[in-house]
């Protein structure tokens, strides 16, 4: 019974319910093994305040999905030397790489300078296993080559980019609906006069990224029931050509839908694409929750399978814990 139904209760307290049953229940979270390597979210960008805020939000989502994951963000090594602290009016130097938070570097406006290299080195120096490197990218990108080279040199475990994936199509669909360019879902049969009748899925990473985005575009087209084509923001003329293709095939209201998370693309490219084509554009994916889910699942998939000895030890520990719980329950009942 919830305290909301008790007279005089100061605040309602949510009472946990029993686990849902049936085919639509949420799957059990896979267990993160004890001593598992940390997750390093490899961000192909300089740590600007806006990028830091976005990544911090994604880290919160990851920890909510898998509380047992140790996660940190690694940035490109280039960062401004100082940033104006709006609360003190004095320029404050960046936090030293790997430094513990304190009264001089814990301010949320600080631009951290922890790099992927620094985080890997810190783990190895502490006797920890080399971390799993998950790139904050929806598809192919030049940064992945450098990341895999670094992993080969240090023994870290790299994953591939987050896409193509149906969850990315879901995130793009939501951003389009937020901009009034698509219905939230096809079950709601209300009219949106500004809805796009064709979508250009824009990404960065050259033609390879555009080709990979085409797979997510197929998934998005199935959700929207409109044609979707992919184009690369960093290939001159690619977005304009895609828009012209849609218009030539009958689209009267084409729109742009960025398949970018945010830090990996310069804001000027998004603005320039909208201005060049005269098309409305949705926002970047940002910290949409499914991005955090994809990061967590990429990390879990990269973890090495436990050895037979480790599996036996874990099973024995779980059995011992269950026996202790039963014994405590029996003692309480006496």
Image (tube, helix red, strand yellow):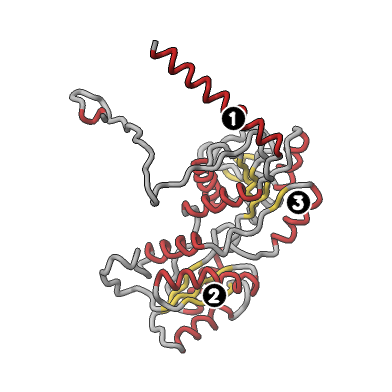
**Of marks 1 and 3, the one in the foreground:** 3
State the residue in front, 218 or 190. Answer: 218
Residue drawn at 40 percent across, 47 percent down: 25
Task: Using the numbered discs, state the Cα–Cα distance from disc 3 to disc 2 in whole angstroms.
Answer: 30 Å
Q: Looking at the image, is 120 positioned above or below residue 248?
A: above
Quick one: label 1 or label 2, which is nearer the N terminus?
1
Would you identify the image quadrant in which residue 224 lies? bottom left
Callout 1 crowding tier (Cα within 10 Å): few <14, some 14–19, many ≥20: few
Q: Secondary structure at mark 1?
A: loop
Q: In this rendered view, identify the residue nearer to me: 156 or 89.
A: 156
Q: Are marks 1 and 2 in contact (CB under 8 Å)?
A: no
Residue on which the image places disc 3: 151
Q: Earlier in the sequence, mark 3 or mark 2?
A: 3
Give the residue pinned by disc 1. 103
Q: Point out the residue furthest to the left here.
A: 7
Whole-number angstrom distance, CA of label 1 to CA of label 3: 34 Å
């Amino acid at each position: 019974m919830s305290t909301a139904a008790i007279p005089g209760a100061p605040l309602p307290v949510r009472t946990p319910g029993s686990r849902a049953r049936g085919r639509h229940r949420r799957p059990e979270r896979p267990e993160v093994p004890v001593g598992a390597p940390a997750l390093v979210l490899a961000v192909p960008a300089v740590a600007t305040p806006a990028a830091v805020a976005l990544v911090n939000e994604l880290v919160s989502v990851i920890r909510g999905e898998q509380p047992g994951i140790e996660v940190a963000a690694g940035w490109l090594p280039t960062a401004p030397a100082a940033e104006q602290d709006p609360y003190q009016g004095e320029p404050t130097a960046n936090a030293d790489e790997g430094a513990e938070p304190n009264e001089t570097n814990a301010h949320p406006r600080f631009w951290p300078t922890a790099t992927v290299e620094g985080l890997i080195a810190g783990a190895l120096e502490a006797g920890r296993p080399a971390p799993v490197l998950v790139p904050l990218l929806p598809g192919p990108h030049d940064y992945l080559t450098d990341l895999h080279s670094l992993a080969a040199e240090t023994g870290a475990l790299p994953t591939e980019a987050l896409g193509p994936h149906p969850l990315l199509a879901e995130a793009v669909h939501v951003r389009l609906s937020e901009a009034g360019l698509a219905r939230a879902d096809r079950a709601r049969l209300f009219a949106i006069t500004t809805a796009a009748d064709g979508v250009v899925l824009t990404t960065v990473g050259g033609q390879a990224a555009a080709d990979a985005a085409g797979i997510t575009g197929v998934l998005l087209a199935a959700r929207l029931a409109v044609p979707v084509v992919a184009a690369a923001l960093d290939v001159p003329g690619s977005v304009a050509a895609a828009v012209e293709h849609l218009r030539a095939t009958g689209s009267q209201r084409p729109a742009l839908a960025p398949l970018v998370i945010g830090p990996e693309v310069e804001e000027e490219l998004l603005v320039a694409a909208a201005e060049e084509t005269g098309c409305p554009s949705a926002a970047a994916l940002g910290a949409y929750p499914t991005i955090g889910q994809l990061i967590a699942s990429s990390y879990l998939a990269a973890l090495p399978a436990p050895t037979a000895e480790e599996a036996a030890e874990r099973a024995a520990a779980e059995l011992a814990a269950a026996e202790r719980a039963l014994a405590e329950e029996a003692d309480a009942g006496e």
